[in-house]
Amino acid sequence: MELKLKRPICFFDLETTGVNISKDRIVEISILKVFPNGTQESKTWLVNPEMPIPAETTAIHGITNEKVANEPVFKEIAPKVNEMIKGSDLGGFNSNRFDIPLLAEELLRVGLDFDMKNTVAVDVQTIFHKMEQRTLAAAYKFYCDKDLTDAHTAEADTMATYEVLKAQLDRYPELKNDTKFLADFSARKQFVDFAGFIAYNKEKKEIFSFGKHKGKLVETVLDEEPGYFGWLQNADFPLYTKKVLTAIRLRKLNNSLNL
C-alpha cells in the first residue's frame, strides 16, 4: 500500500558514536524523502564525528575512525540536511526516542533551529511493537518477506523502514493511511521535549517528569525557584530540552507583561 500523504515525509536513520543523546555524534545519516505524488529523493552522508568511534560501536555498524577521517563534519552538511527535512513530516525506526532527539541536538549545536510544532513523527518501531513486537530485521522479514542485508547501514535501514510501514498498512486495516493518525498511533507517552524531562499532564500543562520537582508545573517551579532555570541551563541536559524550557519561561514572562 502506498502512503497517502498531504505533505512530504522524510524517513531517516542515523549511525552514531553511541546512544547518549547529548554527547554522541552522527557518523552516517541517510534520508529518504517521499512526496505526496509518490516520487522519492534520497541522500546518504558519511560524517566525521570529531570524536573517536568506540570499537564496540564500530562492531555494530562497521564504520571506523579511518572511514570517516576525511568526511565532512556535521556542520558542513547540516544546511543540506535541514533543507531536505524542512516542511516535511518525519519517519523512522525507534526515531522518536533516538534518531529525532539526536538529530535535533546536532542541528541546534551548529546553530540551526529545530522545531516539531508543525511536524508529526511516525515511529515504525512503535507500530511494529504494538502489533508484533520484533526487531527491524524481523519486521522486514515478517512484513516484506525479505532478508535485511547490510543491516546497520543507514541507507539499508532507512529503505527497510519505509517498506515495512507500507506493508503494515496492507496488513492492518485498522491502521489509517494518514500520517497524523500513524504519528499518534506510534507515539509513546506525550513529552514536550524529546528526552522526556518535560511532559504534559492531563490538562496539557507542562510538568517536570524527573527529580525533586517531578509532577510539578514547570511555570510554577520557575516562579517559586528562579535559580532552578539557571541550574538546568548550565547542567548536562539536551539542547532541545533547554530550548523548550526557555520557550516556557519566555511565554510566562510575556503573559505577565500583557496582564
Image (cartoon, rainbow, N blue to C red):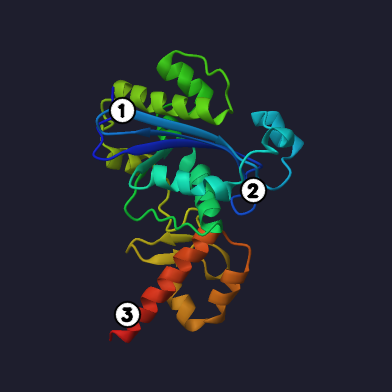
Classify mark 1: residues with Cα within 10 Å, few (<14), some (14-19) or many (20+): few
Image check: 64 left or right of 145? right
Mark-to-mark CA distance, 1 and 3: 45 Å
**Earlier along the polypeptide chain: callout 1 or callout 3?**
1
Residue 172 appears in the rendering = yes
Q: In x, y percent, where is residue 219?
A: 42, 75
Q: In x, y percent, where is residue 102?
A: 54, 48
Residue at screen point 35% across, 43% down: 89
Of the two numbered discs 1 and 2 in the rendering, the one whose residue sits closer to the viewer: 1
Q: Mark 1 points at which residue?
A: 39
- Rendered image: mark on residue 24: 2
**Earlier along the polypeptide chain: callout 2 or callout 3?**
2
Residue at screen point 38% across, 81% down: 253
Mark 1 element type: loop
Comparing 76 with 203, the one in front is: 76
Quadrant (top left/top right/bottom left/bottom right) for the N terminus = top left
**Earlier along the polypeptide chain: callout 1 or callout 2?**
2
Comparing 149 with 67, the one in front is: 67
Image check: 214 left or right of 72? left
Residue 197 appears in the rendering = no
Mark 3 element type: helix
Of the two numbered discs 2 and 3 in the rendering, the one whose residue sits closer to the viewer: 2
Residue positioned most to the right: 55
Occupied quadrant, residue 115:
bottom left
Give the residue type at disc 3. Asn
Mark 2 element type: loop
Q: In x, y percent, where is residue 179?
A: 29, 38
